[in-house]
């Protein structure tokens, strides 16, 4: 299988399956990486039957970077994966989704083109959060991206947006990868799994 990686860490990633165009939740069989957005990775895979989101989850073995994609080709791949504007974000307008309401074929991650933002802030517990506006609604979700945590780790960086955020990252955020967490107490929480640069 060939994957276009979007965001992730040593344990897994959000990626596009280049053979089908599907957006997948990938778990590495052993810690892997580091990888960058839009790296093309070859790996062996099987469906992740143990995942709470088995419909779009895979396990990948022996990932190897075989290239990198940029520009219009990436834009064409990502365009059909952007969350439709006429549907609630991952099935609900709230920041959590009851696990029992999810259909087996419902995606557990999606791409968002925000109308405003993103703004990255630290909350009172010093965890990163991402605020953005989408479909006339303001969203405030945890930012679950260890690579960004490291890039934005300066103690005075309590709120970053616009040009300041772009300088801190070294690129301007274009899209957001939003995912559901595995259920806790029956609820799946929405998180921003990564900020993506313009292809």
Image: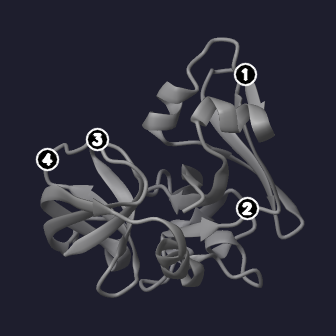
Viewport quadrant of the N terminus: bottom left
What residue lies at 77% left-to-right and 85% top-to-bottom? 86
Q: Position of residue 6 (x, y in %)?
A: 44, 59
Looking at the image, tell me whether mark 1 or mark 2 is earlier in sequence order: 2
Number of other residues with Cα within 10 Å of mark 3, as a class: few under 14, some 14 to 19, many 20 or more: few
Q: What's the CA distance linking mark 3 and mark 2? A: 33 Å
Q: Which one is in front, 183 or 19?
A: 19
Looking at the image, tell me whether mark 4 or mark 1 is earlier in sequence order: 4
Q: Residue 158: which disc? A: 1
Q: What's the CA distance linking mark 1 and mark 3? A: 26 Å
Which residue carries the number 4 mark?
Answer: 30
Q: Are marks 4 and 3 in contact (CB under 8 Å)?
A: no
Q: Residue 34: which disc? A: 3
Where on the picture, by quarter, is residue 4? Answer: bottom left
**Label 2's element?**
loop
Q: Residue 94: which disc? A: 2
Viewport quadrant of the C terminus: bottom right
Looking at the image, tell me whether mark 3 or mark 2 is earlier in sequence order: 3
Tell me which colouring the rendered structure shows.
one colour
Q: What's the CA distance linking mark 4 and mark 2? A: 34 Å
Number of other residues with Cα within 10 Å of mark 4, as a class: few under 14, some 14 to 19, many 20 or more: some
Q: What's the CA distance linking mark 4 and mark 3? A: 13 Å
Number of other residues with Cα within 10 Å of mark 2, as a class: few under 14, some 14 to 19, many 20 or more: few
Looking at the image, tell me whether mark 4 or mark 2 is earlier in sequence order: 4
From the viewer's perspective, is residue 9 above or below residue 86? above
* Foreground disc of the pair 1, 2: 1
**Label 3's element?**
loop
Looking at the image, tell me whether mark 1 or mark 3 is earlier in sequence order: 3
């Amino acid at each position: 299988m060939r994957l276009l990686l979007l965001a992730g860490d040593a344990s897994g990633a959000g990626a596009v399956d280049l053979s089908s165009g599907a957006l997948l939740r990938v778990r590495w069989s052993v810690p892997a990486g580091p990888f960058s957005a839009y790296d093309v990775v070859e790996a062996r895979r099987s469906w992740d039957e143990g995942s709470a989101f088995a419909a779009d989850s895979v396990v990948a073995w022996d990932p190897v970077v075989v290239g990198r994609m940029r520009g219009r080709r990436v834009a064409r791949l990502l365009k059909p994966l952007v969350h439709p504007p006429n549907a609630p974000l991952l099935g609900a307008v709230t920041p959590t989704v009851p696990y029992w309401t999810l259909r087996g074929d419902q995606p557990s991650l999606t791409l968002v083109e925000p109308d405003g933002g993103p703004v990255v802030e630290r909350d009172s517990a010093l965890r990163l959060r991402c605020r953005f506006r989408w479909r006339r609604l303001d969203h405030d979700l945890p930012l679950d991206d260890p690579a960004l945590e490291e890039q934005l780790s300066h103690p005075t960086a309590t709120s970053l947006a616009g040009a300041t955020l772009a300088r801190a990252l070294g690129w301007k955020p274009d899209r957001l990868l939003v995912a559901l967490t595995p259920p806790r107490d029956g609820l799946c929480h929405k998180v921003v799994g990564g900020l993506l640069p313009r292809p």
